[in-house]
Structure formats: structure tokens, C-alpha cells
Amino acid sequence: MNASVKIAVLGSGDIGGTLGANWLVAGHQVAFGVRDAASAKARSALAKAGANVRADTIANAMQFGDVVVFSVPSNAV
Ligand SMILES: NC(=O)c1ccc[n+]([C@@H]2O[C@H](COP(=O)([O-])OP(=O)(O)OC[C@H]3O[C@@H](n4cnc5c(N)ncnc54)[C@H](OP(=O)(O)O)[C@@H]3O)[C@@H](O)[C@H]2O)c1
């Protein structure tokens, strides 16, 4: 059985965008936590991930996720 996990992906760049898109394909639920949902990286990640994903504030994404993945630069953590 493949249980669906709620995953918050903080940062929607190369790493976060790729992980998020692939976890959606694998049947998990994903919310990107971003500082600016209108940024080029956030828009690109949303376009790649498809309809079943959202970009939200970092705080809201962290509340959503049972798992929280940091994919921001280390100095941003
Ligand atoms: N790419 C690789 O091959 C690779 C390999 C190993 C490790 N890593 C590590 O993985 C992490 C992510 O790398 P990446 O390649 O995905 O980077 P990236 O494409 O530059 O994306 C970085 C993401 O972090 C966000 N961000 C940057 N500063 C922030 C801040 N102060 N507060 C909130 N969000 C912030 C950016 O948001 P905006 O869109 O708003 O700028 C963007 O969504 C880094 O720590 C990197 O060292 C990357």
C-alpha cells in the first residue's frame, strides 16, 4: 500500500520544485512554502507540478505538512 503523505516543501527552486513535482506524481500531497508566490521560481514550480499543488506562505505550508523539507539556501534557514 502506498500511503499519501502531506509534504511542505520550503523553497520552490531547482531542488524544491523537482522534489515537489515528483512527490505529487508518486501520490503525495504537496504545498510549497514560498516568500513570494509570484516569483519566477514559484511560478515555474507550480507550472511543473500541475493542478494539485499550491504555493502558500512558509507558515501555512509548515502547518499543512506532516513532513517539512527545507530546499532553501542554508543561510536562509
Ligand atoms: N541544485 C543543486 O544541484 C543542489 C545540490 C545539492 C544541494 N543543493 C542545496 O539545495 C538548496 C536549494 O538549492 P536550489 O538549487 O533549489 O536553489 P534555487 O533554485 O536557487 O532555489 C532556492 C529557493 O529558496 C528560496 N529562498 C532563497 N532565499 C530565501 C529566503 N531568505 N527566505 C525564503 N526563501 C528563500 C528561493 O525563493 P525565491 O524564488 O523567492 O528567490 C527559491 O525558491 C540549497 O541549500 C542548495 O545548496 C542544491
Image: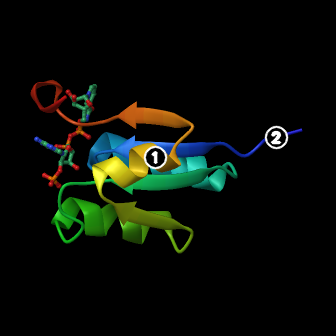
| Furthest residue toward top | 74
* Residue under the image location 30 percent in, 36 percent down: 71
Name the kind of residue labelled 1 in the image.
Gln
* Location of mark 2 (residue): 2
Would you identify the image quadrant in which residue 76 lies? top left
* Location of mark 1 (residue): 63
Name the kind of residue labelled 2 in the image.
Asn
Say what secondary structure mark 2 lies in.
Answer: loop
* Residue 10 vs residue 65, the one in the foreground: 65
Question: Which class describes the residues within 10 Å of circle 1: few (<14), some (14-19), or many (20+)?
Answer: few
Quadrant placement of the C terminus: top left
| Left or right, 20 with reference to 70 | right
| Left or right, 39 with reference to 68 | left
In 3D space, how far apart are the residues under numbered discs 1 and 2 (Cα atoms)?
A: 23 Å
Where is residue 52 shown, x and y percent of the image? Answer: 57, 69
Where is residue 74 shown, x and y percent of the image? Answer: 17, 25
- Please tell me whether mark 1 or mark 2 is closer to you in this view: 1
* Residue 39 vs residue 61, the one in the foreground: 61
Say what secondary structure mark 1 lies in.
Answer: helix
* Residue under the image location 30 percent in, 49 percent down: 58
Whether disc 1's CB lies below 8 Å from ligand 1 is answered no
Quadrant placement of the N terminus: top right
Say if 72 sits above or below 30 in the image: above
Would you identify the image quadrant in which residue 73 lies? top left
Quadrant location of ligand 1? top left
